[in-house]
């Protein structure tokens, strides 16, 4: 039977939803949970003198499944690689984890004929926000004026020129300290706040953007050729932090409304995915008071199942249809 290899984790509800939706399909899902991979897998891959992959086997003892006919790979949300309980020394644990990561990062060569929802290596490029700007420019998709710097004067000049601005991380999402997890969200910034960090701004890159006034905010999820436009409303919460970055609160506290955007604009978003070699993407879009649509960012491996739960939009079904299409190529 044609197989879908899902690289994820035990807690991934997106994988759960798609596996459920695959019931009755000709595609068999094989789930690779990174937490248990070291302990629960057995594998071998052999190449001959010519470099041809001539023998391979990947068996999962926990699910009693063998990945022997993988036609599609879906790199979802891998988590930590838990060491085998027999490995105790810290250096040995790190070696085992690093070598296992190297193995999974080699999936394009281990399954060279498999199609990908989004190839791991093509995910990496747009995962860095700066890399999205030139693609948007090529397609004439407006983006907020942006500055990246590590010294004071350009940052000060930018804030004075644009006035209402925000600061956010380019790729760093959070950190753990004293057994607590902290996230890094979008925040407003002005010159007086910048002045407080004048002596330390050189320690790391600073990502600044002109703040776009919001008439409406959208999460636009493209799955294959399907479009799912969800308007996210925060006004009823009267919380300035949520209005600035809705991720600071629980999704169910927000209002999610299925909506639409001009077909010409959606076509540009699809074209952006095409340029980047992706079949899936979740876009954060803001409509300003002049009805200009600004691309805030593309999440090439973003979350989406919470939107299906809250709106009923058939996103898991669309993912299955994409997987079936890829398997048939």
Image (spheres, grey):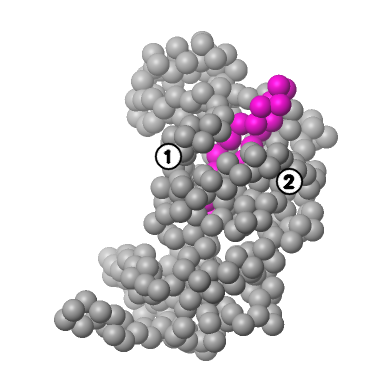
Q: Nearer the viewer, residue 46 or 8?
A: 46
- Residue pictured at 66% horizontal, 76% vertical: 22
How packed is label 2: few (under 14 Cα within 10 Å), some, or many (20 or more)? many
Q: How many marks?
A: 2
Instruction: Say the numbered circle drawn on residue 155.
Output: none
Quadrant in the picture for residue 293: top right
Where is 222 relative to 111, above or below?
A: above
Q: Which residue is mark 1?
A: 131
Q: Which residue is mark 2?
A: 230
- Residue pictured at 29% horizontal, 80% vertical: 53
Q: Is residue 149 left or right of residue 17?
A: left
**Residue 57 shows in this picture:** yes
- Between the C-alphas of marks 2 and 1, the distance is 25 Å
Where is 211 relative to 178, above or below?
A: above
Quadrant in the picture for residue 211: top right
Farthest-out residue, bottom: 64
Q: Which residues are magenta?
A: 283-301
Where is 63 relative to 74, above or below?
A: below
Q: Are marks 2 and 1 in contact (CB under 8 Å)?
A: no
Where is 292 relative to 51, above or below?
A: above
Callout 1: SS: helix
Q: Is residue 120 left or right of residue 184?
A: left
Farthest-out residue, right: 236
């Amino acid at each position: 039977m044609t197989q879908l290899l899902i690289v994820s984790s035990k807690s991934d509800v997106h994988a759960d939803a798609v596996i459920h939706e695959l019931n009755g399909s000709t595609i068999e899902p094989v789930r690779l949970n990174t937490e248990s991979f070291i302990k629960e897998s057995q594998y071998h891959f052999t190449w001959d003198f010519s470099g041809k992959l001539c023998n391979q086997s990947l068996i999962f003892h926990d699910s009693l499944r063998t990945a022997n006919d993988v036609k599609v790979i879906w790199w979802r949300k891998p988590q930590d690689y838990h060491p085998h309980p027999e490995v105790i020394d810290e250096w040995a644990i790190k070696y085992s984890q690093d070598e296992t990561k190297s193995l999974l990062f080699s999936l394009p060569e281990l399954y060279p004929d498999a199609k990908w929802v989004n190839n791991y290596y093509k995910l990496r490029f747009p995962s860095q926000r700066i890399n999205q700007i030139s693609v948007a420019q090529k397609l004439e998709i407006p983006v907020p004026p942006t500055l990246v710097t590590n010294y004071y004067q350009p940052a000060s000049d930018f804030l004075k020129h644009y006035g209402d601005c925000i600061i956010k991380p380019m790729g760093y999402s959070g950190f753990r300290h004293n057994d607590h997890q902290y996230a890094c969200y979008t925040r407003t910034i002005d010159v007086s706040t910048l002045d407080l960090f004048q002596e330390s701004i050189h320690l790391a890159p600073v990502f600044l953007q002109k703040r776009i006034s919001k008439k409406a905010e959208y999460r636009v999820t493209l799955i294959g050729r399907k479009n799912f436009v969800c308007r996210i409303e925060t006004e009823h919460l009267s919380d300035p932090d949520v209005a600035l970055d809705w991720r600071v609160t629980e999704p169910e506290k927000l209002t999610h409304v299925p909506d639409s955007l001009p077909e010409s604009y959606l076509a540009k978003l699809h074209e952006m995915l095409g340029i980047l070699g992706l079949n899936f993407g979740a876009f954060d879009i803001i409509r300003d008071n002049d009805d200009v649509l600004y691309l805030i960012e593309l999440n090439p491996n973003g979350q989406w199942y919470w939107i299906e739960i809250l709106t009923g939009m058939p996103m898991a079904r669309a993912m299955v249809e994409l997987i079936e299409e890829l398997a048939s190529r």
